[in-house]
Image (spheres, grey):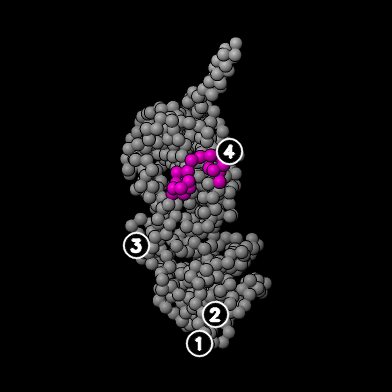
Amino acid sequence: MIYTLVLLASAALQETVAPVDPEVMRGQIVPTITAEELQAHVDYLAGPETRGRATLTPGFDLAAEYVEKHLEQWGLDPAGEDGSYRMPVGLRCVVPSADAVAEVVRGKSEIERLKLGVDFVPVPGGSAERVQGEPIFVGFAIDGRKERWQDLDKVKGKVVFAFTREPFADNPKDKKFAGLEATEHSAIGRKAREVANAGGIALVIVPDPGMFGDEVGPVPNLVPQPLYPGAPLRALRRIASLPDIPIMSLSRKAAGEIFEEDLDDYYASILKRKRPKQLKAPRGVEVVLRPSVEEGVIPSYNLGAWVRGSDGDGETVVIGAHLDHVGFNHWTDQGKMRVHPGADDNASGSAALLEIAQALSGTRPREDILLLWFTGEENGLLGSRAYCDKPLVPHEQTLIMLNMDQIALTDPKSMNLGGLWNAPDLEKFSKRVGKSIKQKLKMDFDGGRELFTRSDHYSFFQKGVPVIFFFEGDIESNPVYHKPGDVPDGILADKVMWVARQVLATAWAFAGEGLRP
């Protein structure tokens, strides 16, 4: 009797833990991806704390920590070394050179050398010549006849200090400039040209208290600055289009000590007066500047997590999205100090990959699934290029790479699946997958050709790996592409949800069910 009861209990236990049919599993995990959770992820990844997630910035690190926290919570296996989700990547960058210098000379004998990266950083693109001269703080370095704002009287032969942005930049009612809309007067290049035209010998940019209230250092995101593959260091000068004078950024603290003034009070007094006001340094004070830069390699990282398969043959499905965006976008935006949040590009894809990770946690597919969040996509696919040069899985064992980049805007009723123009079997496969999950979006297989080389799947495609590029559609109809208006409130969370579900179902069809086109 006892033996019979043991057998019955054993049979019941086996029935309880019997593996779920893979096709049934697909039906269970796909609906767990929700618009509400996606929106919450995008809200953080493209929120004010991350400041646009530019590669090699604290904002990118905060976004990475957010991803890591969730991966650890869900129990996904790290793909990096020593139990880390971080996979090191060395990036070729513009960096300050060893002879970059900022010094304060007081009288004939006292020389104070400021600390690189703490007190000052060079602004790449200007002259690297050494200059020495009397400092003068001019407010915003604006020569605005139309706005009746003249900061640059009597600056000939002097080192000109100026705040970032323009007067009243946080006042929506301002009529003198453009309120919250930054004009050309906010651009570092415009300030530098006005200084050069007025006879100033150098420009020093100081973070203004209106935007950088808690900032203790120089303007962020200037250096190190990743270089595009193959681009020489001199290309940045051409892109920046700066005049041939030295340009640096100093912290408010360091600049305040030079002028022996509280620069927060000085800034407030300009706004209260509603007219320019200059500051002179104490008698006998001069500054020495040399904003020299060079090429160097700075460490960054991709993030990676495994969902391990059961058959152990090494075949793998890769799902990816780039985590970075452009931050302040200094070069394209001309240093106007506007944060580009990157909610669509590509907090949407990164959030979708997080939801896919959560859906896959605790599952046991047949094949391995590798989830990758890339760095440096905006600088020339740097993170995915680095991975593909030294892959964790040989390319011939990578069954497919599924990439999500900008999946939250344009047509709310369709998504683009790029790269299948010469892969009819994979197109039919995608249609069957979509039908199985009752896909609500129309799948466009024709568009996206002009963008195919511009996201991380292309690094895999060049190595012979089959790819699908999941994209929102016509980029020309996206008014906030690489603009400050790419904010979380603007995304179509339902569209992101259905793209993510399609990606998950496709990956599971390959890795969980063993299906092939």
Instruction: Locate residue 309 relative to residue 165 in the image: left or right.
Output: left
- Picture disc at residue 208: none
The residue under label 1 is 109
Is label 3 in a helix, a strand or a loop? Answer: loop
- Location of residue 187 in the rendering, given as x and y in whole percent from the top left corner: 50, 66
* Residue lying furthest front: 2
Q: Nearer the viewer, residue 123 or 29?
A: 29
**Residue 161, relative to residue 232: is it above or below?**
below
Type of amino acid under label 3? Pro
Type of amino acid under label 1? Ser
The residue under label 2 is 136
Visible in this render: residue 31?
yes
Name the mark nearer the viewer: 2 or 1.
1
The residue under label 3 is 232
Type of amino acid under label 2? Ile
Name the mark nearer the viewer: 1 or 4.
1
**Residue 438, relative to residue 56: is it above or below?**
above
Mark 1 neighbour class, 10 Å CA radius: few under 14, some 14 to 19, many 20 or more: few
- Circle nearer the N terminus (2, 1): 1
